[in-house]
Amino acid sequence: MSTETGLAGATRRTAAQREQHRATDWRVFVLSAAPLIVFVIFSLLDVTAMSAAINAAFAWSANMFGAYWQILLLATFFIGLGIAASRSGNARLGSTRDTDFTTFQWMSVVMCTLLAGGGVFWSAAEPIAHFITPPPMFTAATGTQQAAINALAESFMHWGFLAWAILASLTGIVLSHLHYDRGLPLLPRTLLYPVFGHRVMHGWFGAIVDAVCVIAVAAGTIGPIGFLGLQLGFGLQVLFGLPNVFATQALVIAGLTAIYVTSAMTGITRGIRILSAFNVMLALGLMAFVLLFGPTAFIINSFVQGFGTYLQKFIPMATYRGDPQWLSYWTVFFWGWFLGYGPLMAMLVAKISRGRTIRQMIILVSVLAPVITTFWFTVLGGSGLAYELADPGSVSNAFKGFNLPAALLAITQQMPLGFLMSLLFLLLTTIFVATTGDSMTYAIAMVMTADDEPRTSVRVFWGIAMGAVALILVTLGNGGVSALQSFIVVTAVPVSLILLPSLWTAPMIARQMAREQGLLETAHAVKSA
């Protein structure tokens, strides 16, 4: 580990304090575990009634908070870019030039944590979904190449700049400064320290803040784990003829849980870093193959035109409020999902970004990662659109009923070496979900112990617990897992309020960091000279 350069006023935790932090915070544990247990019990008793209750809460959340979320994400993105462009962007997180990760490793962990299974299944399915049923802003063109361009642009909106910016741009600044320079723990409640001071760091108030964020991330991680069991069961049946039954799905989830728990046990600098790097290398290899042997010209042209449409209609798409039902199933759903990940993702980014400048972190999270994501969506989803335009029904028929894995396989099986490509894309999906599982398991354990190097036993418990809940929900079929996915949006309501103060605290903290590191004074002196 590198040596920290302390700032004026910085504090250090003693060994005794650190050991105290390693003790599990039982208030946070109970407050976060109890709602998940209640959810599982009621789902087992009557999944239909549970789904109805969750859907009602989902509809209320989307209706009451959808517009606020749209404004919050827009403000976060533009304020972050403003900080990055300012002199404050030169300030270094942790007040040191030493880093614990290479640039590639750093980018790999960040990229893999958010994309999860969405990096494959949604990138294949969402463009074809918008192509079949054009979004409200793009109803003029249907079944044409322009409709394909529009479909990609709408997908870019949901997985692009705004989705990424809310995860760790402003919140990453706040947590990094308060943790490395002021000695506060990496916890969701720390985001509220500039507003409430020490009151939020102790007692039930802070415990509730932490628990709400843990519930949101747990729901957001358990859902993809459960869906992977269902989706891989379908894929193995198509490719190998294995029966798509609970036993197959259970084996998938058990294997996945073993992978991400083992990775989380070894920590961020070992297992999580290695698994993320392997995941990115596999994704790059598959992307290169598709670009070389797939519909190359269509992919390149569609990305350029789709990204241009995305930029041209960026504000109108981001602020669209004309069709509440469509919004609740698309834009607001995704915003709720990403908001739920916000605090714990910010903790992870702060943990691995020590030594980077504020500008580097914001550019990676808010600009580079979204551009890479949208290009990946064009490579996979754009290939599906090319195949659909050349042979109508070749992808859309498989996708009927919103069948995400069928859409993926319908695309990959039309590629050269279709069987092998289908198998590799399923493997990639598994590792994507595993990288999210290991990093979020680690982050949850950080919250439970108020320590950025939590005990291994806590990591193991939460990793296995999330896999077990996913397994239980899979016994109920799509109903239990779908209800949990909707529950993510409900949990995003309080989380979005926790993220709100970063809109004004992050710029102030960034300027304070630059001032304490002598950057603003130096800039003024040079200007005067």
Image (cartoon, rainbow, N blue to C red):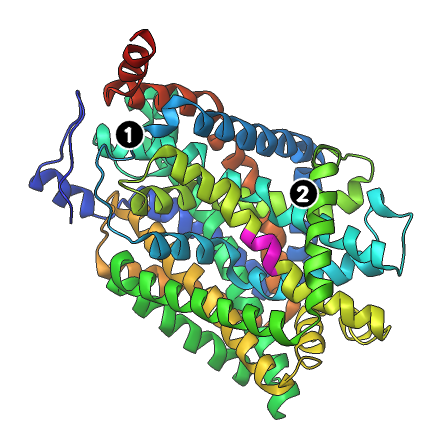
| Bounds of the magenta segment | 372-376
Q: In the rendered structure, which amino acid carries the disc numbered 2? A: Val
Residue on which the image places disc 2 = 332
The residue identified by callout 1 is 178
Kind of residue sitting beneath label 1: Leu
Question: Mark 1, residues whose alpha carbon is within 10 Å: few (<14), some, or many (≥20)?
Answer: many
Rendered residue at 23%/32% (across/down): 95
Identify the residue at the far top of this view: 528
Residue 375 in the magenta stretch? The answer is yes
Q: Is residue 359 left or right of residue 183?
A: right
Q: Quadrant of residue 93?
A: top left
The quadrant of the picture occupied by the C terminus is top left
* Overall secondary structure of the magenta section: helix
The reply to whether the magenta stretch includes residue 385 is no
User: What's the residue at 67%, 79% (across, down)?
Assistant: 415
Residue 233's label in the rendered image is none
Which residue is at 30% across, 23% downward? 513
Question: From the viewer's perspective, is 207 left or right of 220?
Answer: left
Residue 325 appears at what percent x and percent y?
79, 44
Element type at mark 2: helix
Nearer to the camera, 45 or 28: 28
The residues bearing labels 1 and 2 have C-alpha atoms spaced at a distance of: 31 Å
